[in-house]
Image (spheres, grey):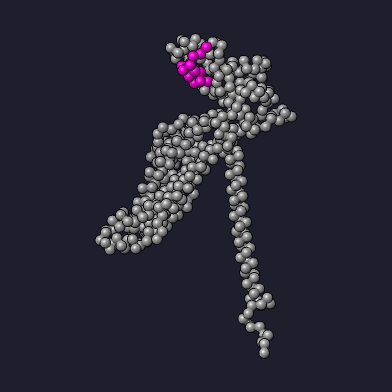
């Protein structure tokens, strides 16, 4: 006889337990969907940020230049100039450039036409013209009525107009680019006298009030000096302090207070370290304001707690069996630590040092507090020279109104991002290469 009764423990669609299971599975599915949505939203925001930075900054790696013709024999005797360099030094190169522009556009008669004609080239272009003309005279034969062809950078506004970052509004009388300037650019294009070249100036010069002449070399060298001082101080002190706390310090109340204090210091806002650096290194020790030494010491205070925490984690990851085996063979405490534990923890320590360097490289607030926000045009040659850092340079340029500094800001951010990505990639590579899985 067949038993048609359903066993009480078999789950059916009408069983309350089955409904609860379906509800729980539905909650888990929704939670996964929320997670996927959050990840996609984060990726979308990151992609939008990177797209905005690169779209605004890639044009900074190009520079618009105008080719002018200079007949130098109208101003000096070339043979005498080769023998006496003072003749070349005494020339008014600004007038030479302006005269060449007048010859290119003889129809420019009115005062406003002449002023806008001269604004086609950068106000500092006469410095480049001096170098080009001097090199031509020293290295080549100059013939009469055979002009020297020189490529000079345009002014920032014309540069942005040629790149398409500034539009010409013919119906707006207050448009940044005037109709006269637009006509000049059109004529130069027809004659092949205007073009875009790789902007080597961006990588070979320091800061400037003129956007087309501003570069990152000064801030880049300053960042190297600052990071060098920071890591030379923070890495040895951090490793030494972490080694003592992890391997030698007695476990008592005082040690616990120190450990808690170090962990809290690693989470303090960076501007607090800037105030500390201002009070100690500038006001007390009297170090030069805006110097790389003061900046490096301030950032060392910032990354020292991070270095201690990461080094302690690396030391703690070494299995206790290594220490026990070394002691069993008669090694002293010092030998156990320096011959066995530290070498095995080196990959983690190196990773922590690189990540600490990356954090110090991206910090701005502490450097602002010690005066590294000042305008520094010259390239620093020592740790005591006035300097600035790449993040601070980004901050300075972002506060300037000219359109040329907008693309320079984005380009400097691109360079900074590349260094940070490389530093993090190096940390990941070293960790994967030297990591020992126990």
Tell me where residue 59 appears, x and y as whole percent.
59, 35
In magenta segment, residue 302: no
Eyeballing the image, is 425 above or below 67?
A: below
Numbered-mark total: 0
Relative side of 122 to 16, left or right: left
Report which quarter residue 402 is drawn in: top right
Q: Residue at x 60, y 39 (%)?
A: 55
Q: Residue at x 29, y 58 (%)?
A: 333
Residue ranking furthest to the bottom? 1
Can residue 239 be seen?
Answer: yes
Quarter of the picture containing the C terminus is bottom left
Q: Residue at x 49, y 38 (%)?
A: 390
**138 or 94: nearer the viewer:** 138
Tell me where residue 179 appears, x and y as whole percent.
69, 25
Q: Main secondary structure of the magenta part?
A: helix
Can residue 209 be seen?
Answer: no
Eyeballing the image, is 241 above or below 101?
A: below
Boundaries of the magenta span: 129-143
Tell me where residue 356 appears, x and y as whole percent.
44, 48
Residue ranking furthest to the right? 171
In magenta segment, residue 136: yes
């Amino acid at each position: 006889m067949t038993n048609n009764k359903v066993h009480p423990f078999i789950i059916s669609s009408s069983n309350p337990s089955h409904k609860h299971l379906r509800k729980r599975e539905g909650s888990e599915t929704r939670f996964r969907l929320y997670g996927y949505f959050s990840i996609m939203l984060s990726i979308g925001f990151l992609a939008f940020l990177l797209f905005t930075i690169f779209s605004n900054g890639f044009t900074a790696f190009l520079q618009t230049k105008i080719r002018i013709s200079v007949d130098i024999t109208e101003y000096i005797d070339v043979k005498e100039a080769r023998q006496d360099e003072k003749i070349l030094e005494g020339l008014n190169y600004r007038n030479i450039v302006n005269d060449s522009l007048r010859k290119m556009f003889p129809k420019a008669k009115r005062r406003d036409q002449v002023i806008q004609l001269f604004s086609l080239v950068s106000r500092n272009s006469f410095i480049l013209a001096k170098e080009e003309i001097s090199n031509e005279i020293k290295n080549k034969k100059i013939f009469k009525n055979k002009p020297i062809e020189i490529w000079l950078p345009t002014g920032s506004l014309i540069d942005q107009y040629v790149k398409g970052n500034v539009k010409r509004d013919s119906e707006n009388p207050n448009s940044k680019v005037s109709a006269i300037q637009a006509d000049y650019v059109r004529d130069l294009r027809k004659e092949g006298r205007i073009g875009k070249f790789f902007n080597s100036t961006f990588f070979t010069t320091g800061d400037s009030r003129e956007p087309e002449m501003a570069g990152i070399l000064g801030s880049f060298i300053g960042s190297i000096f600052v990071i060098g001082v920071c890591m030379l101080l923070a890495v040895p002190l951090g490793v030494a302090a972490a080694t003592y706390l992890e391997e030698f310090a007695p476990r008592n109340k005082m040690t616990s207070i120190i450990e808690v204090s170090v962990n809290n210091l690693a989470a303090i806002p960076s501007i607090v370290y800037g105030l500390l650096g201002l009070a100690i290194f500038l006001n007390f020790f009297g170090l030069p304001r805006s110097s790389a030494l003061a900046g490096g010491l301030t950032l060392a205070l910032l990354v020292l707690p991070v270095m201690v925490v990461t080094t302690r984690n690396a030391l703690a990851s070494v299995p206790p069996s290594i220490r026990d085996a070394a002691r069993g063979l008669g090694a002293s405490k010092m030998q156990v630590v320096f011959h066995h534990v530290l070498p095995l923890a080196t990959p983690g320590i190196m990773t922590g040092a690189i990540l600490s360097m990356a954090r110090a490289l991206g910090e701005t607030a502490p450097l602002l507090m010690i005066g590294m926000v000042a305008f520094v045009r010259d390239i620093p040659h020592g740790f005591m020279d006035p300097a600035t850092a790449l993040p601070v340079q980004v901050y300075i340029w972002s506060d300037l109104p000219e359109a040329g500094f907008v693309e320079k800001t984005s380009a400097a951010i691109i360079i900074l991002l590349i260094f940070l990505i490389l530093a993090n990639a190096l940390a990941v590579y070293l960790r994967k290469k030297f990591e020992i899985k126990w």
